[in-house]
Image (tube, rainbow, N blue to C red):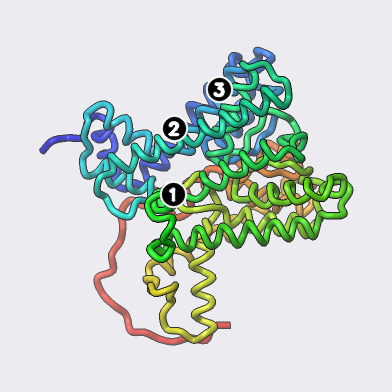
Amino acid sequence: MRRGGPVAALLGRFQHPAQVITTGFAAAVLVGTVLLSSPLASASAEPTDWITALFTATSAVCVTGLVIVDTGGHWSAFGEAVIALLIQVGGLGIMTLATVFTLLISGRLGLRARLFAQAETKSLTAGDLRRIVRNVVLFSLFSEAVVAVILTLRFLLGYGEPFGRALYLGVFHAVSAFNNAGFALWPDSLTRFAADPWICLTIAAAVVVGGLGFPVLFELRRSWRHPGRWSLLTRITVGMTVILLLIGTLVFLAAEWSNPRTLGALSDDDKVLAGFFTAVMPRTAGFNSLDIASMTPSSLLVTDVLMFIGGGTAGTAGGIKVTTFGVLAFVVWAEMRGEPRVTIGHRQLTSATQRQAITIAAMSMGLVAMSTYVLLVLTPHTLDQVLFEVVSAFGTVGLSTGITAAVTPAGHLLLTVLMFVGRIGPVTLGSALALKERTRRYELPEEKMIIG
């Protein structure tokens, strides 16, 4: 039997694809921590403490964007390059890169390596993963290149930056935006560009495209003119994305229109631009053009909800995913109508899909609630601030009310764990920790019970 190469042989040591994904992300975080803690990575040429290095490496690999130190001020060019590379690795996915390496080394894939790559790319079949992985990588690099060109020209022509600096800013923020990372090289993120549509709309478009998910993007490329042919995955992802963006924009405009510390100081057109940008970022991007700490409590709550939901499956976004939220909405609707089956359009959802959505949502809410309580105990900050920070970390968003750097080292470690779990997913983590799947070979009698 022909092997798929040394990488595939290494993958064969694991019992479950989830174990490889978890181990791969952990290894990337470890390497990033070592590199960022070196004197070469800091602008002061002094070693960075390991908690800051670990937190930043995890935030980059998990494409979150939460930071303890100012990215553009603390890190050297080498450190910023390491962060950008970690973002790229995390965005593409450890298994996607491992599959590419296997193809380069051996030119072929074994079945086990195909299954591992399938687990990361969320492809619906295990066939022709060579083409799938190639398309993922090429589309990602092409999208980042387009965004980088637009941003570079804007920084060069609109802000008078030298070409080298403009190119550097364009490439870094293109990688950060498409991968929904939210790392910016200015201490105020993108608030200085709140009224600049070239920068805000370009970054917003990159965030949305990167957060839709590769299966949805590939299907839209094939049949975007024929919505009737779309799969349930694409219908729910596109539909929920449009609805959430519209609701988010309207809510932020209504809540912040007269707030002098956010939208109140802008013109009407700029208010609409900033409101839309603010609605896009909770998809787990983490950039902000408004001061988050100055937003009203109602805006913070809406942002919590949007961050918790996140973006599309198999994309660069985090959260429980819009597909999970959409499935739950249809489950509730079917139950309210007394329907024995959950249907979407002319398709019926399997019971396994419904259970998976409920499990992901329940585990995520439990983790957020428990982490919020622990962080409240560890810090003197308010519930609004702590909940926002916890949801941002778990959803791999990166937005912050400004308390990240002020929490205790124990709080930093808690947020680090949340970012890691939020990136690989609660169910994936649970599967990775399980030694083997258990199958029940018998059925028990049914019994009804009263709910509520």
Find residue 381 and report its horizontal and vertical position in percent: 79, 48
Task: Assign a secondary structure to mark 1.
Answer: helix
In percent of the image, x 65 and y 59: which residue is there? 246
In percent of the image, x 71 and y 43: which residue is there? 400
- Residue 446 shown left or right of residue 329 in the figure: left
Q: Are marks 3 and 2 in contact (CB under 8 Å)?
A: no
Where does label 1 land, which residue?
217
* Among numbered discs 1 and 2, the one appearing first in the sequence: 2
* Among numbered discs 3 and 1, the one appearing first in the sequence: 3
- Residue 397 shown left or right of residue 25 in the figure: right
Where does label 2 land, which residue?
27
Q: Nearer the viewer, mark 3 or mark 1?
A: 1
Q: Calculate the distance from the C-alpha at mark 3 to the C-alpha at mark 2.
A: 18 Å
- Residue 431 shows in the view: no
Find residue 262 and report its horizontal and vertical position in percent: 82, 47
* Among numbered discs 3 and 2, the one appearing first in the sequence: 2
Q: Calculate the distance from the C-alpha at mark 1 to the C-alpha at mark 2.
A: 29 Å
Tag 3: amino acid: Ala
Tag 2: amino acid: Ala
Tag 1: amino acid: Leu
Quarter the N terminus occupies:
top left
Q: Calculate the distance from the C-alpha at mark 3 to the C-alpha at mark 1.
A: 28 Å
Where does label 3 land, which residue?
81
